[in-house]
Image (tube, rainbow, N blue to C red):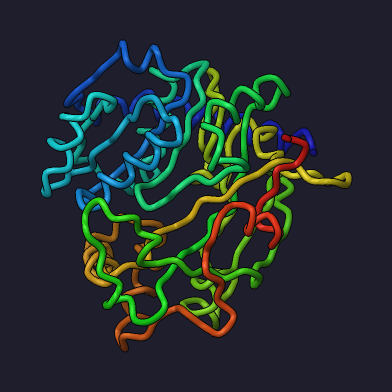
């Protein structure tokens, strides 16, 4: 990498690091459990707004996975989310009504909490509709994964985001609080993905799936990125750079093997496409707080008006992580 690019990335990382420190003033602690955070090895950090219906299953899923504490940033919810989370013994909660867009879509807040409370810990940054799946997750807790990563000298773990959807119209995919969303939306695209290299960040750039197929068919380059590095052993100076698509220092993005073989990697099952999406899309278009003036949500609102769904004849029904490994969407690498 050219010296000039390396300097620019270094300055960018420093600027975002300082931004995160300044943005701490936008966060008001609602329930802070420092002792519980301090005793945890693996924590989740999440930014959420009006997601009360999703929270019970989200918490149950990650508790079963072995997450020891949750750090939630509630961005102006009016559905009781903050109060509900404050009652959970393994949750610390901050509240803010500041602009999601002006916080770099929540990253400034996440980077600050990770810097302040999570140094030396494994941080898993996910949205409430993202569910982390890693090799052997049906028999081993996340602590087994992070212990193996520590023993191997690896500080980050990569995933691909897989959009899940129902068979039939989204309006018929009724979701209730506490329900496993994949009982409702259990299908995915198994093969229509494109991969290219982002040399500046040393990362992969993955696009495709049902969002590219249905909502961005005429503009595939504008389809959402599906590459993620959501799990990072946090150290001073670490920042999420672009959602969890890229992390700095850029060496944390080396979650693939370009000299033959495969590195261990997982997936994030994405439970966005439920009956709640149409109303949520209209709301987010009006708020314009998401990337590109909420163009992604605008595409959803326009594309779902006719009541059609995302299922097609090539859709696959989700079974387990081993199925995803067979399809080449994740790998256990040399972790046995």
- Nearest the eye: 20 or 244: 244
User: Residue, x 45% and y 78% (percent of image)?
Assistant: 310
User: Does 268 sit left or right of 198 as displayed?
Assistant: left
Query: In which quadrant is the C terminus drawn?
Result: top right
Corner quadrant of residue 109: top left
Residue occupying the far right of the picture: 259
Query: In which quadrant is the N terminus drawn?
Result: top right
Q: Position of residue 82 (x, y in %)?
A: 16, 37
Callout count: 0
User: Does 272 sit left or right of 277 as displayed?
Assistant: right
From this view, report whether residue 183 is shown above or below residue 170.
above
Corner quadrant of residue 256: top right
User: Residue, x 68% and y 46% (percent of image)?
Assistant: 203
User: Residue, x 72% and y 59% (percent of image)?
Assistant: 196
From this view, report whether residue 184 is shown above or below residue 138.
below
- Nearest the eye: 224 or 334: 334
- Nearest the eye: 320 or 85: 320
Q: Position of residue 278 (x, y in %)?
A: 27, 72
From this view, report whether residue 141 is shown above or below residue 38.
below
User: Residue, x 44% and y 30% (percent of image)?
Assistant: 66
Question: Can residue 205 be seen?
Answer: no
Q: Position of residue 275 (x, y in %)?
A: 27, 70
Question: Can residue 22 be seen?
Answer: yes
Q: Position of residue 293 (x, y in %)?
A: 35, 63
- Nearest the eye: 244 or 331: 331
Residue occupying the far front of the picture: 139
């Amino acid at each position: 990498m050219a010296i000039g690019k390396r300097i620019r990335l270094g300055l960018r990382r420093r600027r975002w690091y300082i931004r995160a420190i300044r943005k701490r003033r936008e966060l008001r602690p609602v329930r802070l459990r420092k002792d519980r955070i301090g005793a945890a090895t693996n924590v989740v950090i999440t930014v959420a707004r009006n997601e009360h219906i999703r929270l019970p299953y989200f918490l149950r899923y990650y508790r079963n996975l072995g997450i020891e504490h949750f750090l939630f940033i509630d961005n102006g919810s009016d559905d009781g989310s903050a109060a509900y989370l404050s009652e959970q013994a393994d949750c610390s909660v901050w509240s803010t009504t500041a602009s999601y867009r002006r916080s770099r879509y929540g990253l400034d807040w996440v980077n600050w909490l990770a810097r302040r409370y999570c140094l030396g810990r494994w941080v898993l940054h996910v949205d409430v509709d993202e569910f982390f799946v890693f090799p052997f997750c049906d028999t081993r807790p996340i602590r087994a994964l992070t212990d193996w990563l520590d023993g191997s000298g690896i500080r980050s773990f990569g995933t691909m985001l897989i959009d899940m959807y129902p068979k039939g119209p989204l309006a018929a995919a009724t979701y209730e609080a506490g329900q496993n969303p994949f009982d409702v939306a259990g299908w995915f695209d198994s093969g229509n993905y494109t991969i290219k290299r982002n040399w500046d960040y040393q990362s992969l750039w993955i696009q495709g799936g049902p969002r590219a197929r249905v909502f961005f068919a005429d503009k595939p380059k504008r389809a959402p990125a599906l590459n993620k590095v959501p799990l990072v052993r946090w150290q001073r100076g670490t920042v999420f750079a672009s959602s969890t698509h890229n992390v700095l220092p850029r060496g944390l993005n080396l979650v693939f093997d370009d000299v033959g073989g495969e590195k261990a990697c997982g997936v994030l099952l994405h439970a966005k496409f439920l009956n709640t999406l149409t109303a949520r899309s209209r709301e987010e278009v009006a708020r314009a707080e998401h990337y590109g003036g909420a163009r992604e949500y605008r595409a959803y609102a326009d594309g779902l008006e006719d009541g059609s769904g995302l299922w097609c004849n090539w859709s696959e029904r989700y079974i387990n992580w081993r199925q995803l490994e067979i399809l080449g969407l994740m790998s256990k690498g040399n972790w046995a």
